[in-house]
Image (cartoon, coloured by chain):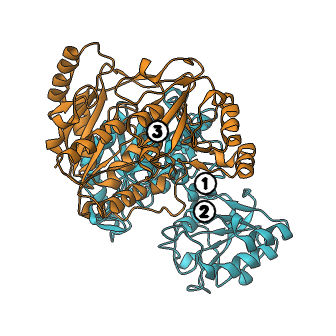
Chain colours: A orange, B cyan
Amino acid sequence: MLDDDDRVAVLAHEKFPERAKTAVGILRYADYEVAAVLDRQNAGDRVADHLSGVPDAPVVASMSDAPAVDALVIGISPIGGGFDESWRPDVRTAVERGCDVASGLHHFLGEDEELAALAADHGVDVWDVRRPPADLTVAEGVARGVDADVVLTVGTDCSTGKMTTSMELVRAARDRGVDAAMVPTGQTGIMIEGWGTPIDRVVSDFVAGAAEDLVVRAAADHDLLVVEGQGSIVHPAYSAVTCGLLHGTMPDRLVICHAAGRDAIHGYEDYAVPPVESYVDRYESLAAPVNETRVVAGALNTAALGDDAAAREAVDAYADAVGAPATDPIRFDAAEVVDSLC
Amino acid sequence: MLDDDDRVAVLAHEKFPERAKTAVGILRYADYEVAAVLDRQNAGDRVADHLSGVPDAPVVASMSDAPAVDALVIGISPIGGGFDESWRPDVRTAVERGCDVASGLHHFLGEDEELAALAADHGVDVWDVRRPPADLTVAEGVARGVDADVVLTVGTDCSTGKMTTSMELVRAARDRGVDAAMVPTGQTGIMIEGWGTPIDRVVSDFVAGAAEDLVVRAAADHDLLVVEGQGSIVHPAYSAVTCGLLHGTMPDRLVICHAAGRDAIHGYEDYAVPPVESYVDRYESLAAPVNETRVVAGALNTAALGDDAAAREAVDAYADAVGAPATDPIRFDAAEVVDSLC
């Protein structure tokens, strides 16, 4: 676990920043400090050369070049969640320097023979964020009865900004004085918030149960929950996760996330992204027999669009398509849609 | 693993036959011989006293009373999949007599300290059917390209007869000379067929990948695949499994299974079963962006209805509701709808 006053290095070799979702999420939202980003392709640059609106830090080639830190965080996750052997020297160096290691890979570093032994030798912790709790079970169907408003972010695809939108909505709601909480369901959110369950790693029979458990726990302490959604309900590989979250969390409201210009499923380019407007009914009608819900806002990632005027035009068209107020929570402001949540 | 010429005893204490889905499935469909059913409540009866249309066998009180067999099969699975300690003496006796043990429980007998040690001492195998392969990964989105027709059984709820319907459709297709194969996704089907993957036990990110893998493997050897479906797409606990199967197997055709008279979700009585006709569009429209499919037949479990005339009337009404030919594959004949599959 990472503390608010920790300093960390974030590994993002050859992927920073566009394909380093976890690294960017941590830079943007974590309370602990990022002292360096490891990216051998951009070594010598600064974070600020690539990303605005986040704390700056040096980009270095390897852990040997990183300043003193408390932990190394694996900030990228290839499809399949495997460990890239080219990262091993960095993890080894980190452990030998006495750093903890946090990883959201499917491949658990704590079960890697060499790294586990090395970590034990050096008395450091390996936090495999994607390891689910051992005591999960099937859903009881009780999330609809919790004493909190539950919002779920859903998407037209993976990597459309569900985690970012969830974080920004919680911030905007808190700015209005609402006792709001983010409910993390993926490795980045869990690394940022320090709790949550990696839903995509849960045994499929227990997905809805794990989601229900998160909602029940968070509802005991907060008035508004924004559950981080995963995948897409028509994704060729990940729809099981999405469907279990939809029925397990029993949200009162949905916020639908899309990336401007995305017309094929990310990583599955033979599969088209259906028209955005079709997703509204698809999510609402699939949820309805278990719990009535409706899309109350849209979030559009406009990073692919050149200027603010084009982005605003795209957001307006998106709002029309989904039949609800919309924004780009990064380029513009989540406050534009937060009224819809409460 | 069980061979076609094996003889087995099937444990079904206090649940035979109504709540012993696995035991009944094995009696009905397995190629190996059931030499005895263990049910301490009905000891002294015959299988034929309780079930028709299956091979007869004695019902005995314990493994000590069973004739010589090659294996003991656990033929019941309580909600949660736990091991009932009252069964331990039977498993112990079986192992001591040199029998293999096959179990579909979530609780793996191969990890039970006493039983694992005893099995090693006696040189017998413990086959935990519900343990998924270790090498699963995410779907590649390739199932739609296989060289076989793929049919998936789907349902309005759990326990509506998807496994039974799949078995009966394969038999009926073979009777027509079609090279058809059942693709097992649950413990009973796996025990009967001797291969398959327990989809509900797979990590949620890999559900579609595991389903795809089954289809790709079976398509190499057969012309028509009938994939055993699981759960329901609007089940409060198990929809993740259903959704991953739908998108991972990319079926050409669907057969929808329902139990006559079922109006609330089994075990979740606060949740109504939506109108049967609404499921047709729900399954088809959810599948469409990944792979176009359509409901081509219906299977209605009419066990709750008194006589054949009432059952036929219910089947006809069901056919109208789902807009496709329908039958009860047990009371009537799967051959009535098999033309729709090919």
Give the residue drawn at x 64%, y 79%. B87
Amino acid marked by disc 3: Glu
In the image, A14 versus B248, the foreground residue is: A14
Identify residue for label 2: B104
Q: Write down the chain letter for disc 2.
A: B
Amino acid marked by disc 1: Ile
Identify residue for label 3: A33
Give the residue drawn at x 65%, y 38%. A94
Q: Is mark 3 on a helix, strand or loop?
A: strand
**Do badges 2 and 1 share one subunit?**
yes
Amino acid marked by disc 2: Gly
- Residue depth check, mark 2 versus mark 1: number of the one nearer the observer: 2
Q: Write down the chain letter for disc 3.
A: A
Q: Which percent across, then down, holds residue B79?
A: 48, 69
Q: Which percent across, then down, holds residue A15?
A: 52, 23
For this view, does B220 lie left or right of residue A296?
A: right
Q: Is mark 2 on a helix, strand or loop?
A: loop
Q: Quadrant of residue B35?
A: bottom right
